[in-house]
């Protein structure tokens, strides 16, 4: 199994990592056994040569780029004579050239008699190397298909399959002036790879702009960049006509952005704080919560009681409830309450209903529509196509870091959106 | 004997015990367990060794003037240090306690426990009120032929037997750390324990053994001080050498050879400062100022070298096999 996160000792050589736990030893003057790497180095160099991996067994892991480290993981399995190789999203951290190289290697392995299991979101990779593919959707096996006889459009359709429908009433949008204007935005991830490339779009007041795309298409990084959580490499972001490309998070919050992050437990909340502190965590520095630099706990408590009442947050101990002890749905309600109360002109929702039960999902989707009807601009990022189709006024589809299609929601069918998401259809 | 020779002789007598303690620290920390307990471990090891040697001499287990009790006391000190390190290993490896707190508490515990036990044992067993076990200062040796070489020759003059022992031990433990399977597993445990676990090696076992080794080596180092600088065991043994060893291994970047250089620097700094006091005929009350030198040097070096340092990647991280 090649994991998404490598299990490598960073200050060891390639060969030392590969034989870790089964090091060959030699006897020194018939006494102490010492580790002799020379035969291993030779064997690994030979393996690397045979499968075209171009890995030097004596180089140290921390000096190697991610793509080479991944090939070390492959070598590790080959050295142990594995017959079945499992790759879990192997291309997630690679550049396009590196992906091409990896797929070539996978094909070489297949041709030399190995069995390969490739887990991926990306249809093009399957098209390039797979012989057969199985489609999973929400944990269910949808179909197993021979690649030679199936069309990509058909595969894309099956991948986006429909979930049980529950309708919400949605009034037509009444868009106002432009609130968010993003131009030519480029965002890098921590590996210095461009994950959002030249993205441009606008969101109007009273409009829900939904970003569709398979996981890892750059949509989360895009939302983080707009919220100020990750730096922008190039391009501009304007909020109500003001340039906020380099503004601090606090300035953006005051300027009118509220953000419901994807990871509610790590980014959204301080789990070991009481609910009241979390509800005020974006406004504690303003009156009435703070007076001449001194916090006023009684204001926190009464504010929290008010929000608990109005947003129906279920908690065992009122304002003093430890946030960690609350259910995921109620934690999400608390974040939504805090962010809605910001009275922001732009609200960003990233995967707002992930992991919630149907009741909580419906409540949050209704809330998103309400906020739109109150004249706010909404940026919704979701991996659930159903959610996007149920809520969006405008749909932007991201594929491989680019916004490849922006269109009014009622001009696109589910199948069309799916094809754009999979990169089958280009605009 | 010139002053320069004295600096080398006394410097080595301090630097080598410091090095063996620091290597103990390296074993623990390269396996991923912070070891601030070196001070307590060296003290407890010295206590066990000194108790053994004192009893052996008092009750005439060996012929008079025999050096056997001294040599055996180093073995006892190593066992005592390792036994005391079991506490740190249990807390940090098995029970996943905070490694900094465990280390600090073990230092305090060791100081209090040995102080109490020393007076009690003196009173009840040896029948005299005393807060220390008197030892002789170990004999010194000179290889007369080599000692005639200018400057370097001083390294072969008036050295203690334990200095030879330490040089041998350093070679053995260097080999273990860098050339054996156990050493490879130990260093992997401090960098990426998950990778080691995935390779089928039990991380907790490797770390447990590493902490025991650090206790044993610290105990030997403590015994050296009891037989040289102090000539006895008492709470004076807790003079901060354990912490100086930690500073040395950090300057040495958790590697044995650079740590040797750091220990030599500290040793020569102290013996040089002492010699300076003599030359300048300073008053003894002012002379104590010389004791500050190694520690002041530590602070200055910290300011310059810290940014080039790279600790083992998983140092201080509690290993949880379910976490990825």
Image (cartoon, coloured by chain):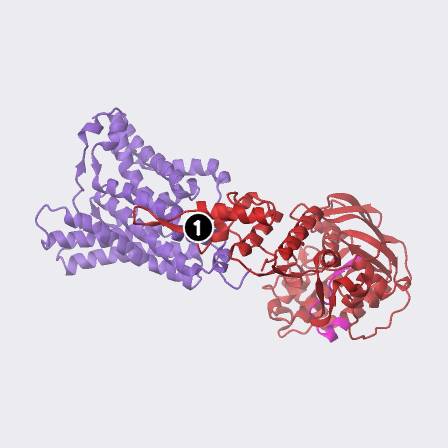
Chain colours: A red, B purple
Any part of residue A371 in sight:
yes
Give the chain of mark 1: B
Q: At 24% across and 29% down in the image, what residue appears? A: B154
- Residue A354 on the magenta segment: yes
In this view, A163 is above or below A113: below
Quarter of the image where the C terminus of chain B is located = bottom right
Q: Indicate left or right for A256 with A172 as reference.
A: left
Crowding at dot 1, Cα within 10 Å, few <14 / some 14-19 / many 20+, comes out as many
Q: Closer to the camera, B54 or B119?
A: B54
- Residue A248 position in % (x across, y down): 71, 47
Quarter of the image where the N terminus of chain B is located = top left
Picture mark count: 1
In the picture of the structure, the residue carrying the numbered disc 1 is B187
Tell me which corner region of the image, top left, top right, bottom left or bottom right, holds residue B167: top left
Q: Residue furthest front?
A: A112
- Residue A191 position in % (x across, y down): 65, 47
Q: At 36% across and 34% down in the image, what residue appears? A: B265
In this view, B31 is above or below A276: above
Any part of residue B281 in sight:
no
- Residue B56 position in % (x across, y down): 13, 53
Tell me which corner region of the image, top left, top right, bottom left or bottom right, holds residue A340: bottom right
In this view, B293 is above or below A227: above
- Residue B281 on the magenta segment: no
Q: Indicate left or right for A123 with B257 as reference.
A: right
Q: Closer to the camera, A325 or B317?
A: B317
Q: Closer to the camera, B184 or A408?
A: B184
Q: Which region shows up in magenta?
A: A341-362
Q: Closer to the camera, A225 or B273?
A: A225
Q: Regarding mark 1 in the picture, which secondary structure is present there?
A: helix
- Residue B131 position in % (x across, y down): 20, 52
Q: At 48% across and 58% down in the image, what residue appears? A: B199
């Amino acid at each position: 199994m090649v994991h998404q996160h490598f299990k490598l000792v960073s200050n060891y050589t390639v060969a030392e990592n590969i034989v870790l736990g089964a090091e060959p030893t030699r006897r020194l003057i018939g006494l102490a056994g010492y580790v002799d790497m020379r035969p291993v180095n030779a064997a690994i160099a030979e393996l690397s040569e045979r499968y075209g991996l171009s890995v030097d067994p004596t180089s140290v892991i921390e000096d190697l780029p991610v793509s080479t480290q991944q090939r070390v993981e492959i070598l590790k399995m080959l050295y142990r004579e594995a017959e079945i190789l499992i790759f879990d999203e192997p291309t997630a951290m690679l550049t396009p050239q590196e992906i091409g190289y990896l797929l070539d290697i996978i094909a070489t392995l297949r041709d030399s008699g190995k069995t390969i299991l490739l887990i991926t979101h990306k249809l093009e990779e399957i098209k390039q190397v797979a012989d057969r593919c199985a489609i999973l959707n929400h944990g269910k096996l949808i179909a197993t298909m021979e690649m030679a006889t199936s069309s990509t459009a058909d595969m894309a359709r099956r991948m986006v399959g429909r979930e049980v429908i529950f309708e919400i009433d949605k009034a037509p949008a009444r868009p106002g002036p432009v609130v968010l204007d993003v131009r030519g935005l480029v965002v890098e991830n921590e590996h210095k790879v461009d994950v959002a490339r030249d993205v441009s779009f606008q969101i109007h007041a009273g409009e829900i702009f939904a970003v569709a795309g398979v996981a890892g298409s750059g949509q989360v990084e895009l939302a983080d960049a707009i919220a100020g959580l990750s730096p922008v490499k190039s391009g501009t972001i304007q909020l109500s006509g003001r340039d906020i490309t380099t503004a601090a998070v606090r300035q953006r919050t005051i300027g009118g952005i509220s953000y419901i992050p994807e990871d509610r437990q790590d980014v959204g909340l301080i789990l070991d704080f009481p609910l009241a502190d979390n509800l005020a965590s974006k406004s504690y520095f303003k009156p009435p919560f703070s007076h001449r630099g001194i916090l006023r706990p009684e204001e926190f408590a009464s504010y929290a009681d008010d929000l608990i009442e109005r947003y129906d947050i279920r908690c065992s101990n009122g304002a003093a409830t430890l946030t960690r002890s609350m259910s995921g749905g109620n934690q999400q309600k608390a974040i939504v309450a805090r962010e809605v109360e910001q009275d922001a002109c732009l609200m960003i929702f990233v995967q707002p209903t992930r992991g919630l039960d149907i009741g909580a999902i419906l409540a949050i989707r209704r809330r998103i529509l309400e906020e739109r009807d109150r004249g706010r601009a909404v940026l919704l990022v979701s991996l659930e196509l159903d959610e996007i189709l149920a809520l969006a006024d405008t749909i932007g589809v991201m594929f491989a870091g680019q916004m490849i299609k922006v269109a009014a929601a009622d001009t696109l069918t589910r199948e069309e959106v799916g094809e754009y998401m999979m990169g089958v259809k280009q605009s | 004997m010139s002053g320069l020779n004295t600096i080398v002789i006394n410097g080595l007598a301090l630097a080598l015990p410091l090095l063996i303690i620091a290597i103990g620290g390296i074993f623990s920390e390269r396996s991923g367990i912070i070891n601030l307990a070196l001070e307590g471990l060296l003290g407890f090891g010295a206590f066990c060794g000194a108790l053994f040697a004192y009893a052996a001499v008092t009750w005439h287990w060996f012929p008079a003037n025999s050096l056997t009790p001294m040599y055996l006391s180093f073995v006892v000190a190593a066992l005592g240090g390792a036994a005391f390190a079991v506490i740190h290993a249990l807390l940090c490896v098995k029970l996943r306690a905070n490694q900094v707190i465990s280390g600090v508490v073990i230092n305090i515990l060791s100081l209090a426990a040995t102080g109490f036990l020393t007076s009690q044992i003196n009173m009840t067993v040896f029948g005299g009120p005393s807060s220390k076990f008197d030892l002789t200062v170990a004999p010194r040796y000179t290889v007369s032929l080599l000692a005639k070489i200018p400057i370097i020759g001083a390294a072969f003059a008036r050295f203690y037997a334990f200095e030879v022992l330490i040089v041998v031990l350093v070679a053995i433990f260097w080999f273990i750390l860098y050339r054996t399977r156990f050493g490879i597993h130990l260093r992997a445990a401090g960098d990426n324990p998950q990778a080691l676990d995935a390779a089928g090696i039990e991380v907790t076992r490797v770390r447990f053994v590493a902490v025991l080794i650090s206790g044993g080596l610290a105990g030997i180092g403590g015994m050296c001080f009891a037989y040289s600088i102090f000539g006895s065991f008492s709470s004076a043994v807790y003079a901060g050498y354990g912490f100086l060893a930690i500073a040395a291994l950090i300057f040495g970047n958790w590697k044995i050879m650079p740590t040797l250089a750091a220990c030599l620097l500290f040793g020569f700094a102290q013996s040089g400062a002492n010699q300076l006091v003599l030359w300048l005929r300073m008053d003894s009350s002012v002379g104590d100022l010389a004791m500050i030198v190694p520690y002041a040097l530590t602070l200055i070096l910290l300011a310059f070298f810290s940014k080039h340092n790279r600790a083992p990647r998983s140092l201080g991280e509690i290993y949880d096999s379910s976490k990825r």
